Image: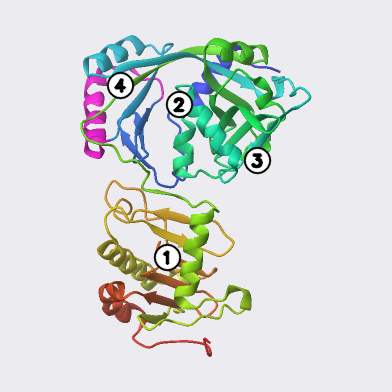
Amino acid sequence: MALDTGQLLAEHDDTLRGHVREHPRLGTVVERIGPLNLTHYGTHCVVDHPPLDAEGSASAARLAQRVQASAAARAEPVEWRVFQHDAAASHLSMVLDEAGFAAGWERGVLVGEVAELDFPEPEQGWEARSVRWDEPQAQQALDLAARTGPHRAPLATWHAMRSTSYWDVEVRVLNHHGTVTAACWLENVSDTAYAVIGGLTAARPELLAQLPLWRFGSPPKQFLVADADGEARDVLLAAGFREVTTVRSRQWTPPGEPAATPPARHSLDNGEIGQIARRCKARVGFDYDSGSGRYRAPADSRRWFYGLPGGSDDPAIAAAESVIERGLRACVRPGEWVYQYRPYLNGWEFDPHRVGGPGQPSWPGSAINGEEFQFLTTADARLGTFDHYAEQTLVVFGEGLLAQVTDDLDRLLGAGTWTFGPQT
């Protein structure tokens, strides 16, 4: 039985507002300030919270000041969305006005039960399909998104984070004779029955026909949410969405230049990563196709055996990881990135000076995997690590990095060089 509008609003508020992912997205930090959740992306900050109670409403001015202080310390512009049905909405809006937050877009909040929605199929000659970031049509979608909006969640944000297609974010395009004419993108709200439409570049509901919401995993997606006005609102209402409230964006920009990129992100399977992979393999003479993972440790390298009695849970492994992190921070130039490359598997890339510290995203890479061949290296492969999981051998290469880590790794893993046979 379909829910009424009041039930949809209550479900929306109880589930979506103030929701924190069990595992934060790669490169993000979630900070708790009273009833507020601040998601720091490194490039900007988004404020989210459940409806404020009397105590939260009374302390709204102090909360706003704390948000501004946190964002200013990171030079992150802030977006704070105010829902008009909240009892404290008028007071919160007044507080944000006084604090210097500018009023942005105002739109209806639309919620649809997936089982009740009816989207038209594309007409003959038109095709709606999902795209990956490395496809040319994804760039066309990004161009359309940049020329439209503002959107609830800019597509450029998801692209900058390299959010995983078909899992974290679903990007859909409408093609006509090979040209992208419209695009939409959806976010999976993990651990909930919700998916959120981050943006629509045109009022084309065909984009949402036969949407593979099953890709978002468990629990199954029962609700689809959008912020919309104008024609987009009209076509979504016609498809079965219901308007449950309105929301207004409030924005504040601190002094300073915000970062152009997030501190960490997934790697794309593109030409740049392909070149880095070739440099990595050449650096240690790694032959993945040999089946045994044959390699040849270079002259400016050392090898350590990490097959300790405690296995991967041995405290020495965690301590060795910390040594490598410290060494990479000391050797990698400001603004330079480190890449975790695993043959034929997804990888990561990150700025070692912007992760792993207080208030920063967690360090995403690892030197020791124990289950896959992997590299942790600079783009030019002048320094880094290679993990030969079959041998349980860690190879550290690059004179500068060796100078930083050798004594500590000798103490933790032993000073001998261990192998299981010839490496050439």
Quarter of image, res 135? top right
> Does dot 2 land on a helix, a strand or a loop?
loop
How far apart in space, not on screen, are marks 4 and 2 (Cα)?
15 Å
Residue 174 vertical placement versus 348 (above, below): above
> In the rendered image, which quarter contains the N terminus?
top right
N-term-proximal mark, 4 vs 3: 4
Instruction: Report the residue that reaches farthest toward the bottom.
Output: 422
N-term-proximal mark, 1 vs 3: 3
Q: Is residue 262 left or right of residue 193?
A: left
N-term-proximal mark, 2 vs 1: 2
Front of the two marks 4 and 3: 3
N-term-proximal mark, 4 vs 1: 4
How far apart in space, not on screen, are marks 2 and 3 (Cα)?
23 Å
Q: Is residue 187 visible?
A: no
Q: Is residue 310 left or right of residue 34?
A: right
The residue at 32%/63% (across/down) is 325
Residue 358 vertical placement versus 206 (above, below): below
- Say if the magenta span includes residue 63: yes
Q: What residue sits right under mark 1 in the picture? A: 376
Cβ atoms at labels 4 and 1 below 8 Å apart: no
Label 2: few (<14), some (14–19) or many (≥20) C-alpha neighbours in 10 Å: some
Q: Which residues are magenta?
A: 50-75
Indicate which disc residue 56 carries. Answer: 4
Q: Where is residue 30 shown, x and y percent of the image?
A: 37, 39
